[in-house]
Every structure is written in structure tokens, then in C-alpha cells.
Image (spheres, rainbow, N blue to C red):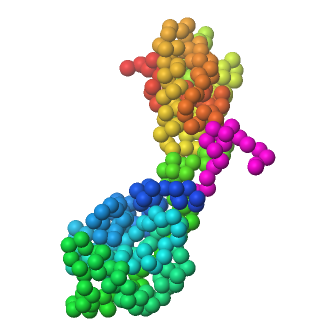
Amino acid sequence: MDKYITAQQIANGKNILPIDRIKLMSPDEWEALIEEWLETTQKYDSRKIERLGGSGDMGIDVIAYITNPKDNPNYEWDCYQCKRYDKPLNPSGMWIEFGKIIYYSFIGKFPAPKSYYLVGTHGIGTLLKKYLIDSNNLKSELLKQWDSKCKNNISNTASIQLEGAFLDYFEKFDFKIFNKVEPKIVVKGHKKHANHLLRFGGGLPSRQNFPIPEIEADKELRYIKQLVKAYDSDSDSEINEVNEISKYYERHFTDSRKSFYKAEELRVLTRDNLPEIFESLKDEIFDGVINTVENKHENGYTKVKTVEDKAVNIKIESNPLREACETIDKKGLCHHLVNDEKISWVEDEE
């Protein structure tokens, strides 16, 4: 047993490595994962990747178009056959899949694919790997296996005899198109997809320090302009620009900018994988402070500090960022809400 056990492990059990988690996926989940992984490869236009699957799929689970099928009946495409078995793929279970793709391309349901990839949750067995490496051996063995594995299993309405024109097509078929993708390649590539954390968990990545830019880069942002108005509403002397902020407000101004960019760290943390949870966190803060925002306040400066204090005491219940969210982040999220024009310290003039 591990020496150190976290509360999360007690609640949810020990983390399962992605390479092991895929072995627990349903066939539909596995196909969806392959579709998402293909989107990360940049090998295809993501709009040209389509998941078929189900009965009557003619041996195609995920199709990746290389050229547009609407422009040319002889369009180019790659086929991904996704297998969710409880062991590595072996030749016995795959002869029918090879037979389908050859037969249905022969009768014109689709052109022969440029490449055909087997993708199994448990990988590819040694014997099948050898066949995929040696296309001539694969061809000759499929020919031997046709009557027992393919003839009566490709179609529910007909027995597919390997003879005549079909046999000629079979002999000329390019068996080099048949290949494989190892599951570890899928898992590694899928890390780039926005759904990776949702599918595999594992927690958020570490926060990266977000440097606070020079004020010149920020002074046109709404949250800065609103802070200037808040200080002006409290000050005896007029404050219209950042460079007019007196020392009395400097500490708060500096802390406000720091908190804004600490909250920005949270946004960047989830930007690639779970962008919606940052927006959800902002919504939680908004819901928690809006009554305080709408209360009457002596001036804008009193208002901003009162709302910040309210935000600090909001308990984040269910958002996945709750463990990463610090006190300063909650203040910063108030300034993000100002920047988004959701709340104001001083109402803008029309």
C-alpha cells in the first residue's frame, strides 16, 4: 500500500493510468476517443473526421477524409477500425474486417482507403503484427481464410464468393494499406485534446506564474478604468488617470492588479482542457457578490473593498478549481467580472 494516501484517493479510489483506463471503455467511448485523438494529430481537417460505427458500418468505425467526397467519387480517405476487446487483436477476429473493406470497395460503396488502421484497446497481438508487416503473407492467408471467416459473414443476404471479377479485384488490391496504431500513441496524442481531463482525470496541471505586465499595457482595460473611478469617488482631489492615483490608494491598486493576474493563472490553467470551468467559477463568484454589488455604498472605493471582502468568504463547493482557488484569486475574479462588464464600481457615463 502507498505510504501517502490523499483524501481524493479515499473518495474516488487510486488513479487509473490512461493506458489502463482505455481498457475499461465501452466500444462507443473508444470510438469517440479515436475521433478526438485524430483531431489532435493535425493530419486531417477536423471537419473531415466522422465517426460511423454501429451495425452496417461496412468495416468503418472512424473515417478521415483526405479529399472531399462531394467533389470526386474517387475521393481519398483513411479508415480507422476501433476494437474494444479484452485482449490484443489476433488474426482470427480480423479476417472479416479485412474482407469487408475489400468487398465493399469492390462493389462501389466507397473507394479503397489510402490507409486502413486497426486500433485496439489492448493493442495488437504478435501474430497479427507479423501479418501487417508482411502484406504478401497477409494476402495469401486471407485467401485461405475466406471461406471459413468471410464468405458468409460479410452480408446478411448473400454469400460472398471469392471468384470472377471479385477475385481479380482481390488479387490487385493493395494489402500494404493495412496497418495499426498502438494505444499508447493514442493516449499520448489525446493529451492535447480539450476533453483529455474529462476522459482520463489525473488532476489539473500545476499553476504557472503569470507575470504582471507594465501598467501601460493595461491602462485601457475596463477594470483599471473602474478602479480609477472608484478612487476618484473617494478622493478629495480629482483622479482621472492612472498616473494621478495618490499613495493612499497605491497599495490597493497594486494588490488589485496582482489579484487580477492571479485569477488569470486559473484561466490559463484550464484554457486548453476545461475552459468552461473558469467561466463557471466566475459565475459562482458573481452569484455570491451580486447582492453586495447592488447594495448602496458610500462611494466606489468602499464598494470595491466591500465586494472583495464578500468574495473572499465565498466557499467554492463543486467547481473542479476549488482546490486551486486561493483567497487572492477570488478578489481577482471580481476584477475579471468588472472587465467583462458584469459588475461596476462606478457606473459608466452614457
Q: From where the camera sits, is residue 6 visible?
A: yes
Which is nearer the eye, 345 or 329?
Answer: 329
Residue 89 image position (x, y, % from top left): 49, 73
Q: Looking at the picture, how far across and down is residue 302, in whole percent?
A: 59, 13
Q: Residue at x 77, y 44 (%)?
A: 4
Residue at position x 27%, y 65% from top?
A: 56
Specify the quadrant that holds the C terminus.
Answer: top left
Which residues are the magenta region?
1-18
Residue 246 vs 131, above or below: the answer is above
In the image, residue 160 lies at what x, y percent? 25, 81
Query: Is-magenta flag for residue 10?
Result: yes
Residue 223 appears in view: no
Residue displayed at 66% across by 42% down: 9
Q: Quadrant of residue 298?
A: top right
Q: Is residue 331 above or below residue 44?
A: above
- The relative height of residue 244 versus residue 235 in the rendered view (above or below) is below
Q: Is residue 4 left or right of residue 206?
A: right
Q: What residue lies at 42% left-to-right and 74% top-to-bottom?
A: 93
Residue 94 inside the magenta-drawn segment:
no
